[in-house]
Image: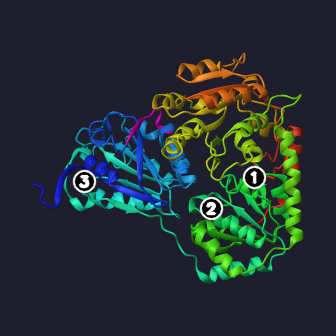
């Protein structure tokens, strides 16, 4: 029998009670650390975890998912909107329900996002084995589907006894809140163990208020980095997603202004600075801008802040001069030291403040800053023409321009995978800080609608009057669209721009650019499709409860967007765009792609030679 300082609970009840007692301080205000969860019940989680969640449904709201993968995407979108300060859990049944979360876990891992997975598992006793949906390994009975999550989680545990969660839950939360190790946490919950009871210490369920750690960088590393910046003739700052996660936007802007250093943004770092800031030289890399890439080629010292230097940022390491000195200011040691960087391991806000103090009144040469600004002015002219409607085929860029001109400054924009991340990154003009989510860490099709739903749930907690706007291609829509229904059911309005180019057009473009013929990407070029069929996307979206309409051109799209803004429920606007014309043709660095070294196709051979001609620019990692 439980004593006065203990309480007898099932494992499932203790997990949920513990989560409900965890809080976090954000900007002086306390919030429950876990914003709730997404769940699809099955035989691996409904009887025990479901019972526990029912008793806490008022403090940990459970959103009913339509697909486990999309639940994980929604949790990622929620975490991004909250700048990794709060998370959602996902619960799925044993077997295929849990397996469906694997891709979402990989997305959260690649993007370093907190997400807690509470997933069913087979019976620890093995008395009923083999059970429904169990994956048997004849030589290792301990191995199952849940073990597949080990490579794509930052914290993994299988609970084999109720007492284990006394240690495991705090460790999972500490991982999800760590600036350097942040990522998804997975708890495998065997069906029998979920219902087993234990006398838990009452102290475990006391209210706990968390605060995210800020690591002060080493003074010697700061001094060495500042000396390199003071000696630079052509310094540049790369602002990554870590700037926003650290809450260092103001410090970044102040540092750039005080020392007159041009700033370029990564895909994850879009909306670190306003589009109109004179030191914002544009997005960098494969999906970047001519302006940012032009100064990146000439920069002699590059301060990378909160960036993991992915190949779309570095142009597969051709974007920078071979002898350019990189300084890596990052909470993660792994990221801070990449490619011969001078590491400054620490929090971006504290690091920029320390660097500013060490830099004194030093400023970059005015001629360098003037050059960067003139490059940005030329890029602005290109973008203005690129997004403008005219006597040409409909394009992603034109749709982006129409929405950009009409949305509110605090509306959130979401895009992921395919051609739209590149088009949004290059053409979107940031109206306010932290309003752009281009998911290109894992470049995951299907995130567009599900991630936007999660972002809208988070947005409704602090900015309910604002809209979440998602740009989605037909390929991603057909892959995962069911959270249109989720958004309608939960009354979390989305505005979905569904831009139909007849298949996987951006990969078709890559196929053509490497000398290959169009094959199996566009519906019209798929040999197993005798006759291409056009989906009635308007009717499909309407069947899930959304308001939907089809427009013929960007001007009509703009008028439809006004109606969508005025609507109080999810609104889908469909427009066909050209698969071949209207792509943003400027602003691209080289990108390493595997091309055939031997081929009978002369166009492929020519493209291979052309592709390889840029390789000498590639920066070596030694």
What residue lies at 74% left-to-right and 65% top-to-bottom? 237
Residue 237 vs residue 294: left or right? left
Q: Nearer the viewer, residue 34 or 441?
A: 34
Percent coordinates x, y for residue 247 in the rendering: 58, 61
Q: Say whether residue 63 is magenta.
A: yes
Q: Residue at 78%, 27% (x, y): give it.
A: 555
- Percent x, y for residue 1? 9, 54
Q: SS of the residue at dot 3?
A: helix
In front: 244, or 581?
A: 244
Q: In terms of secondary structure, where does tag 1 sit?
A: loop
* Residue at position x 81%, y 48% in the image: 597
- Tell whether label 2 touches label 3 (CB within 8 Å): no
Distance from disc 3 to disc 1, alpha carbons, whole Å, reads 52 Å
Location of mark 3 (residue): 162
- The single residue placed furthest to the top in the displayed view is 531
Instruction: Provide the residue span drawn in magenta.
Output: 61-69
Question: In this figure, which residue is indicated by the disc labeled 2?
Answer: 243
> Quick one: SS at disc 2?
helix
Earlier sequence position, callout 1 versus callout 2: 2
* Residue 433 in the image, given as x and y percentages of width and height: 65, 53
Tell me the residue that label 1 is attached to. 275
């Amino acid at each position: 029998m439980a004593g006065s300082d203990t309480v007898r609970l099932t494992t499932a009840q203790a997990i949920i009670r513990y989560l409900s007692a965890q809080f976090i301080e954000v900007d002086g205000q306390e919030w429950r650390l876990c914003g709730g969860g997404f769940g699809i019940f099955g035989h691996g989680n409904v009887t025990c975890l479901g019972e526990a969640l029912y008793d806490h449904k008022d403090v940990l709201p459970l959103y009913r998912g339509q697909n486990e993968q999309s639940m994980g995407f929604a949790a990622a979108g929620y975490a991004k909107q909250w700048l990794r300060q709060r998370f959602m859990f996902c619960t799925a049944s044993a077997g295929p329900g849990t397996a469906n979360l694997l891709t979402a876990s990989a997305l959260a891992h690649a993007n370093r996002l907190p997400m807690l997975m509470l997933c069913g598992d087979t019976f620890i006793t093995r008395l009923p084995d083999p059970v429904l949906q169990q994956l048997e390994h004849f030589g290792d009975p301990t191995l199952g589907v849940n073990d597949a999550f080990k490579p794509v989680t930052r914290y993994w545990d299988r609970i084999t006894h109720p007492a284990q969660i006394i240690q495991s839950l705090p460790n999972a939360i500490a991982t999800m809140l760590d600036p350097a190790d942040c990522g998804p946490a997975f708890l495998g919950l065997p069906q029998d163990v979920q219902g087993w009871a234990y006398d838990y210490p009452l102290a475990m369920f006391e209210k706990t208020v968390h605060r995210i750690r800020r690591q002060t960088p080493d003074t010697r590393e700061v001094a060495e980095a500042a000396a390199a910046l003071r000696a630079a003739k052509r310094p540049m700052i790369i602002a990554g997603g870590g700037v926003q996660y650290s809450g260092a936007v103001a410090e970044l802007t102040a540092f750039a202004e005080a020392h007159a250093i041009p700033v370029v943004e990564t895909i994850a770092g879009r909306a670190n600075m306003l589009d109109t800031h004179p030191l914002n030289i544009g997005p960098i890399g494969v999906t970047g801008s001519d302006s940012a890439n032009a100064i990146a080629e000439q920069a002699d010292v590059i301060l990378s802040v909160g960036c993991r230097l992915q190949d779309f940022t570095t142009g597969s390491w051709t974007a920078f001069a071979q002898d350019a000195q990189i300084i890596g200011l990052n909470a993660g040691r792994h990221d801070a030291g990449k490619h011969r960087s001078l590491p400054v391991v620490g929090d971006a806000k504290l690091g920029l403040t320390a660097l500013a103090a060490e830099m004194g009144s030093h400023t970059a040469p005015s001629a360098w800053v003037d050059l960067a600004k003139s490059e940005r002015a030329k890029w602005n002219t290109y973008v203005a023409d690129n997004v403008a409607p005219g006597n040409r085929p409909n394009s992603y860029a034109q749709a982006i321009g129409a929405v950009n001109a009409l949305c509110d400054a605090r509306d959130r924009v979401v895009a992921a995978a395919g051609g739209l991340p590149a088009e949004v990154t290059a053409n979107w003009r940031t109206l306010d800080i932290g309003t752009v989510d281009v998911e290109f860490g894992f470049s995951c099709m299907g995130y567009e609608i599900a991630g936007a739903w999660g972002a809208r749930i988070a947005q409704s907690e602090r900015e309910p009057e604002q809209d979440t706007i998602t740009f989605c291609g037909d390929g991603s829509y057909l892959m995962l669209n069911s959270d249109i229904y989720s958004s309608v059911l939960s009354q979390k309005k989305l505005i979905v721009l569904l831009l139909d180019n007849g298949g996987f057009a951006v990969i078709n473009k890559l196929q053509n650019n490497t000398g290959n013929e169009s094959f199996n990407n566009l519906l019209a070029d798929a040999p197993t499709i005798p006759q291409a069929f056009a989906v009635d996307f308007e009717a499909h979206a309407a069947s899930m409860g959304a308001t939907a309409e089809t427009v013929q051109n960007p001007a009509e799209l703009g008028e439809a967007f006004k109606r969508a803004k005025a609507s109080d429920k999810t609104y889908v606007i469909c427009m066909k765009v050209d698969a071949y014309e209207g792509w943003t043709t400027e602003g691209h660095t080289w990108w390493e792609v595997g091309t055939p070294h031997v081929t009978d196709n002369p166009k492929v051979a020519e493209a291979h030679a052309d592709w390889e001609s840029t390789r000498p620019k590639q920066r070596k990692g030694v």
